[in-house]
Image (cartoon, rainbow, N blue to C red):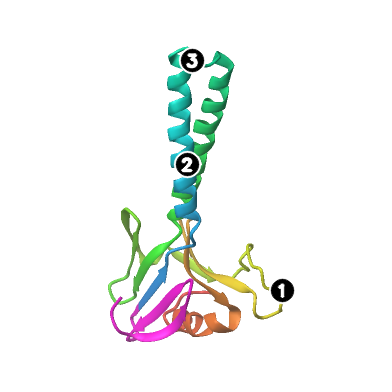
């Protein structure tokens, strides 16, 4: 990421302001993506091996049910992670050009700034902190098409500078 005024920097990502017109948010998500891909790869390979053993008639046919269940579960998990991946990435909110550019793992999308409906900071449901004010919250950008983009994650007080930037730029809270 290029130099800019740091509005947020933590283990979950960073938010930088480049002047008064550009906000760059890096929110890659957590390690769930990598863990699911590794477990799903194991399940798919094991399913192929079990199916091969059953095909060679070295194992009874009902064992094939295990392979089919593992393959279906792995496929469902990979699809869920892929859908979740669309929420994260590096976002460049360019108010001068009037566009939002999202660069994620394996994709790039561009949204017109006019599709922004508002911004919110709901609590992160997987938070382990019970202290009021210290529990992490998501900085969410809501679009007119119903999509939500995760710009960052931090306690409410740490999201303040980014929220102030968005408010100055005309994004409704």
Q: Is residue 19 magenta?
A: yes
Q: Quadrant of the N terminus?
A: bottom left
Q: Position of residue 42 (x, y in %)?
A: 46, 40
Q: Nearer the viewer, mark 1 or mark 3?
A: 3
Q: Position of residue 156 (x, y in %)?
A: 59, 79
Q: Is residue 72 above or below residue 2?
A: above
Q: From where the camera sits, is residue 146 visible?
A: no
Label 1 – label 2 distance at C-alpha: 32 Å
- N-term mark: 2 or 3: 2
Label 1 – label 3 distance at C-alpha: 54 Å
- Check disc 3: other Cα within 10 Å, few if <14, some if 14-19, many if 20+: few
Most extreme residue toward the front is: 58
Q: Quadrant of the C terminus?
A: bottom right
Residue shown at 51%/43% (left/top)? 77
Q: Quadrant of residue 88?
A: bottom left
Look at the image and give the residue range highlighted in magenta. Answer: 1-22
Query: Which label was assigned to residue 40?
Result: 2
> Which residue does the numbered mark 1 point to in the structure image?
130
Q: Position of residue 135 (x, y in %)?
A: 64, 74
| Disc 1 element | loop
Label 2 – label 3 distance at C-alpha: 25 Å
Query: Which label was assigned to residue 58?
Result: 3
- Check disc 1: other Cα within 10 Å, few if <14, some if 14-19, many if 20+: few
Q: Nearer the viewer, residue 30 or 158?
A: 30
Q: Position of residue 92 (x, y in %)?
A: 34, 70
Q: Quadrant of residue 137?
A: bottom right
The answer to whether marks 1 and 3 mark residues whose Cβ atoms lie closer than 8 Å is: no
| Disc 2 element | helix
Q: Nearer the viewer, mark 2 or mark 3?
A: 3
Q: Is residue 29 above or below residue 51?
A: below
The answer to whether residue 7 is left or right of residue 112 is right
Q: Is residue 124 magenta?
A: no
């Amino acid at each position: 990421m290029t130099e800019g005024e740091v509005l947020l920097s933590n283990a979950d990502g960073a938010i930088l302001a480049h002047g008064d017109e550009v906000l760059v948010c890096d929110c890659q998500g957590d390690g769930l993506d990598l863990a699911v891909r590794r477990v799903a790869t194991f399940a798919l390979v094991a399913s192929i091996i079990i199916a091969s053993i059953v095909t060679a008639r070295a194992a009874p046919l009902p064992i094939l049910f295990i392979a089919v269940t593992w393959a279906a579960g792995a496929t469902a998990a990979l699809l869920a992670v892929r859908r979740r991946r669309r929420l994260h990435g590096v976002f460049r909110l360019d108010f001068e050009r009037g566009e939002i550019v999202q660069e994620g793992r394996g994709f790039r999308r561009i949204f017109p700034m006019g599709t922004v409906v508002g911004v919110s900071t709901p609590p992160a449901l997987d938070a382990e902190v019970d202290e009021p004010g210290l529990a992490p919250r998501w900085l969410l950008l809501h679009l007119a098409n119903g999509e939500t983009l995760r710009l960052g994650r931090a306690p409410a007080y740490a999201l303040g500078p980014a929220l102030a930037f968005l408010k100055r730029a005309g994004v409704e809270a």
